[in-house]
Image: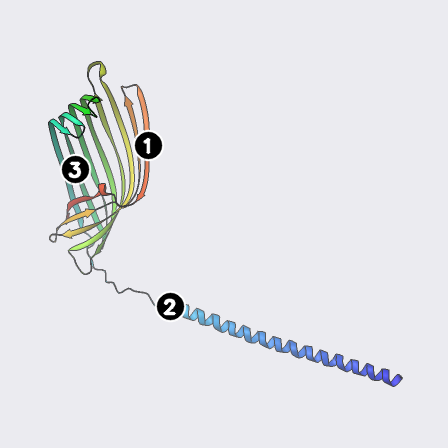
């Protein structure tokens, strides 16, 4: 019995020693695997950095050659003038009958810009507009039993605007005759208007003063007729506008109105044509 117990004790010690050896071998194998994984990770990271650095050194290009459409040092100047007038004598249109009066509109806008770099120009323009309407008499007929008479209506207004502009020109291919431009505009303006109607004890009048601020983007196209003159057309597509108006009626009643707007669309009323000179 004593010999059997000794034998069992020896067997247990041998098993413990074998288990310790197995654990040590497992730890060594796992350590070797971790070391190999770490080496592979370092290799992959270095390879990625090498590829990124090589791609960064290679400059991407579309193969587009930009020519000097508007050379540095050129002065760009021009002026647009518009005038319209109409008069009516017993004129009839839709619900308006026996219309007698006249109206006119006048606007002038000079421009001056300087190309401080190739295809880049900055400058400004000034605009002044004046409108007058005088209606001696008119009749608004809605039906055979409903009509309104209007007489002695007089309206006059004048507005002025100062605009700072920045342009970036782009030629169409290799052409030096046709090109596009993108114009950023910052405009500040103001004006006055007067409206009178009636006569005698029915006379009434309103006086208004306004202030406006506009910021917008107006792309356009330019066509050179020769080396020094060109025709331009541009249209507003993006803009923010603010306008405040203060009105006084019969020198007693005071009112204020404010208009704010922002849009991203083609504004057909902002299309402008003009002749410019490149000196």
Instruction: State whether residue 54 is above or below residue 84.
Output: below
The residue labelled by disc 2 is 55
Residue 254 figure quarter: top left
| Residue 271: x %, y % from top left | 21, 44
Label 1 and label 2: CA atoms lie apart by: 54 Å
Residue 103 figure quarter: top left
Considering every residue shown, the one lying at the far right of the view is 1
The residue labelled by disc 3 is 108
| Residue 272: x %, y % from top left | 19, 43
Secondary structure of the residue carrying tag 1 is strand
Instruction: State whether residue 182 is above or below residue 191.
Output: below
| Residue 153: x %, y % from top left | 19, 23
* Residue at 85% across, 83% down: 6
Residue 24 figure quarter: bottom right
The residue labelled by disc 1 is 258
* Residue at 21% across, 51% down: 115
Q: Please tell me how many numbered marks the rendered image carries.
A: 3
């Amino acid at each position: 019995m004593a010999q059997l117990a000794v034998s069992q004790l020896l067997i247990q010690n041998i098993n413990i020693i074998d288990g310790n050896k197995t654990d040590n071998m497992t730890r060594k194998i796992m350590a070797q695997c971790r070391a190999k994984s770490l080496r592979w990770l370092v290799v992959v990271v270095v390879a990625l950095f090498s590829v990124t650095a090589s791609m960064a050194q290679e400059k991407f290009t579309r193969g587009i050659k930009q020519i000097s459409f508007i050379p540095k040092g050129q002065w760009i100047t021009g002026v647009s003038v518009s005038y319209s007038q109409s008069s009516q004598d017993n004129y009839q249109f839709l619900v308006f009958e026996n219309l007698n009066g006249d109206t006119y509109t006048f606007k002038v806008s000079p421009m001056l810009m300087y190309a401080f770099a190739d295809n880049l120009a900055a400058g400004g323009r000034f605009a002044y507009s004046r409108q007058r309407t005088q209606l001696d008499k008119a009749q608004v007929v809605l039906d055979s039993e409903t009509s309104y008479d209007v007489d002695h209506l007089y309206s006059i207004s004048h507005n002025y605007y100062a605009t700072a502009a920045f342009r970036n020109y782009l030629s169409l291919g290799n052409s030096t005759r046709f090109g596009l431009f993108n114009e950023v505009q910052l405009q500040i303006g103001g004006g006055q208007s007067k409206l009178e109607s009636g006569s005698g004890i029915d006379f009434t009048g309103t006086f208004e003063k306004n202030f406006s601020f506009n910021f917008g983007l107006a792309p356009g196209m330019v066509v050179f007729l020769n080396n020094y003159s060109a025709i331009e057309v541009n249209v507003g597509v993006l803009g923010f506008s603010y306008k405040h108006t203060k009105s006084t009626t019969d020198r007693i009643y005071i009112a204020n109105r404010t208009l704010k707007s922002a849009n991203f669309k083609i504004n057909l009323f902002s299309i402008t044509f003009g002749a410019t000179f490149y000196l």
